[in-house]
Image: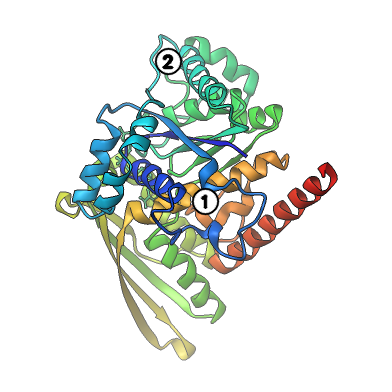
Amino acid sequence: MRTGVWLVGARGSVATTSIVGGLALRAHLAGPTGCVTELPELRGPALPAFADLVFGGHDVATTPLAKRAETLAAAGVLPGRLVAALPDELAAVEEELRCAPGGDTPADRVAAVVRDLTDFRDRHRLDRVVVVNVSSTEPAAHPHPAHADLAALRDALADTPDVLPASSLYAYAALQAGCPYVDFTPSTGARLPALHALAVERGLPYAGHDGKTGETLVKSVLAPMFAMRHLRVRSWSGLNLLGGGDGANLADPAANAAKVESKQRVLGETFGYVPQGETRIDYVEDLGDFKTAWDLVTFTGFLDTRMRMEFTWHGCDSALAAPLVLDLARLTAAAHAAGRVGPLTELAFFFKDPLGAPTHSLAEQWARLTEFTRDLHAGKENADGHAG
Ligand SMILES: NC(=O)c1ccc[n+]([C@@H]2O[C@H](COP(=O)([O-])OP(=O)(O)OC[C@H]3O[C@@H](n4cnc5c(N)ncnc54)[C@H](O)[C@@H]3O)[C@@H](O)[C@H]2O)c1
């Protein structure tokens, strides 16, 4: 199943690490540590092989991909030997990267993205292309009445300059081009009723939001533990320190607010009440892609006895995110091949702020994901059996 992986933000840290990782896996230069689709519970015939993935994407930046990869290698995010071993493969992906679309109106920009996606699909004779948004986090979108209605949105795209934020414009174009869309960021993306209607009209699945890779991943394991033991969490405060492009972008208060909201949701939705405390994200340039999170939790037990726990997480953000980007592309491609339409709520395991109203418990999310992939593999074996 030849599958295109079109990355919006293709020259960023997460995208570059995903591309180098995907190429290294294809060349058997690296193992799949961190790729959950390679665990025995998820592996199977419905998923495209790593060798079947073809990369392309859009970015507003123009730094050559190989240069970005070298910078990440110098920072210890990627092994330098992989970058050195893959010059031709990286050059081939470079050929598939396009500038973020220009145009006078949003409709012109949508048309340009649709053209880039369909050209890519045709050029490589791909069965499908999954569009994954890994571009900079945007501030929350300004509400617009056309967000609620597909026909109104189609009209507004012709003459209303800012009717959609960039992430939703890419989502619209992806769906219009017949491509499933995954949002790895907290940006609005496909999360608008009009875009849901477009996905249904075009018979496409979509997934999101905001990859769960570090502090929130730990929270989604610990919070259900407190809830299941009927312990009362009184406060949960977190401080995240990070550098890199994501950190620099999150220094903007509006983007920071969107991210913080996404990170705290797990607590309110797990406990049914919101403990005191906040999650803060501070930019420290020197840390680069390596993030440190400190969390302090205060809670009470039997007879109101007060207790506390603390944890520290030191993560390399792009190395944690990239295998999940590959997982999401493979799973979403398989879901599309199986005829799934609308939000893929079974992929909640991967996200801080999952679509629908599923559980935030990682254990329950894992159970739903394994059931989902079992069904996909059974359906594929069935179809192959009939074809044979
Ligand atoms: N790394 C993680 O663990 C993690 C986890 C969850 C979510 N995310 C999200 O993933 C995204 C990428 O993170 P990163 O560390 O790679 O950031 P980055 O700054 O290195 O990369 C973002 C890229 O997006 C590009 N871009 C910005 N606006 C664009 C547009 N309109 N069209 C096309 N490209 C555009 C930038 O030029 C840049 O190359 C962020 O939104 C981040 O919040 C990352």
182 lies above or below 62: below
Coordinates of residue 155 in the picture (x, y in percent): 58, 12
Q: Is residue 60 left or right of residue 32?
A: left
Q: Element type at marker 1?
A: helix
Coordinates of residue 378 in the picture (x, y in percent): 76, 55
- Front-lying residue, 8 or 285: 8
Q: Is residue 322 left or right of residue 49?
A: left
| Residue under pointer 1 | 327
Amino acid type, mark 1: Asp
Q: Residue at x 61, y 41 (%)?
A: 333
Q: Residue at x 30, y 46 (%)?
A: 85
Kindly tell me whether residue 63 is visible in this rendering: yes
Q: Residue at x 62, y 27 (%)?
A: 178
Amino acid type, mark 2: Pro
Q: Is residue 54 left or right of residue 283?
A: right
| Residue under pointer 2 | 161
271 lies above or below 338: below
